[in-house]
Image (tube, rainbow, N blue to C red):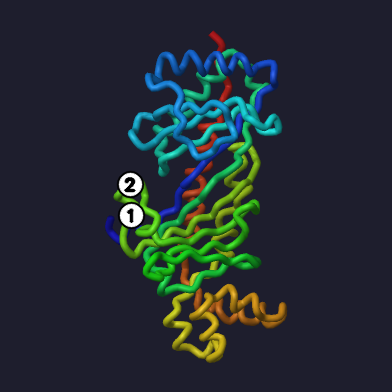
Amino acid sequence: MSESSYPRLQLDALAFTIRITRYWFETFRTNLDIFCSENTPAGDSSEFSASRYRRTVKIGLGCVNRVMWVQVNPFNQADSPIRVELKGHPYENIHYKRANAIIRTLLYKIPSDEVSTCVTRVDVALDILGSLDDLYCHKLRSKVYTTTFAQQGELVCIRLGKSSSKYYLCVYAKKWKESRYSHTTKPGCLRVEMRCKPRVPLTHVIAELDIQKRLDNILLINRKVVSNSKVLTRSERSIARRFGITPLIMSNSPNNKRQLIDRLKDYRMPLIASGFVRDRCDTIHKQLCNLAKLKVKHR
């Protein structure tokens, strides 16, 4: 891939539940059985990391790597009876259209006013050129900072925030976490991944996430530029080199912390133009709205 194609903003994960009243669940299960018998020769598949459901069905979306998983019959009755996860991102309009057609088929005979969706997980990924060896990473208002190192001691992943929280940030080297698609894996490529659990309908996801605000809270700072400047004292530079910029920031008092962040903001690297973010968010919003069109025409 040429460098001119960077940066790229896209969905990297999407999972949602379909809520229907218990009265209609047998109808859904019958529709799923019929669909599998006609379209899925392999039947049910157990190849799935989530194990909260008794039954998992793998459905292709017209491309080898892009598949939809439909899960039913949760072990815990508190979980939604139906869960859908789309894997193999990035998706094009044709894949969302295919997924919508399948979901509509599974909801055949179920009134649309009895159906609602709730997004339980969505990852928004931004690919940029760079290396964690050359950058300091920080997320404003984050108190949790964890790192992962490769066997040779290379820094390959930074997590900012708790994985159990509604939103946290993960920045990792794509050469460490190989993609399924060779065209998205490139030495020197970093993935900035915003992992969210919005718990809103598909049509409300983009408004709830406020991607531009999330991006504004991320500080990527060139290590060499900061080291050559006088923004950090000698001892601060030593702490940052050993532990990272977030532990340095968190070690300060609230007032000093704000002052340090304000000084560092002058050295932040621009991630992506706001106009591009707005256009991409509009496109993703339309795709999710098309996926959410679940009104079924009864035959």
Let me know if residue 116 appears in the view.
no
Residue beneath label 1, please? 185
Q: Which residue is mark 2?
A: 181
Q: Residues within 10 Å of mark 1 (few under 14, many from 20)?
A: many
x, y percent for residue 20 = 66, 24
Name, please, the residue furthest toward the front: 151
Q: Quarter of the image for the N terminus: give it.
A: bottom left
Which residue is painted at 40% across and 30% down in the image? 61
Q: Secondary structure at mark 2?
A: loop
Viewer-side residue, 4 vs 103:
103
State whether residue 282 is above or below residue 72.
below
Q: Position of residue 135 (x, y in %)?
A: 45, 73
Q: Quadrant of residue 205?
A: top right
Q: Residue at x 63, y 48 (%)?
A: 208
* Residue type, numbered disc 2: Tyr
Above or below 29: residue 145: below
Q: Residue at x 41, y 73 (%)?
A: 133
Residue 226 percent across, percent down from the top left: 48, 83
Most distant residue in the top direction: 299
Q: Secondary structure at mark 1?
A: loop
> Which amino acid, mark 1?
Thr
Q: Quick check: 11 above or below 291?
A: below
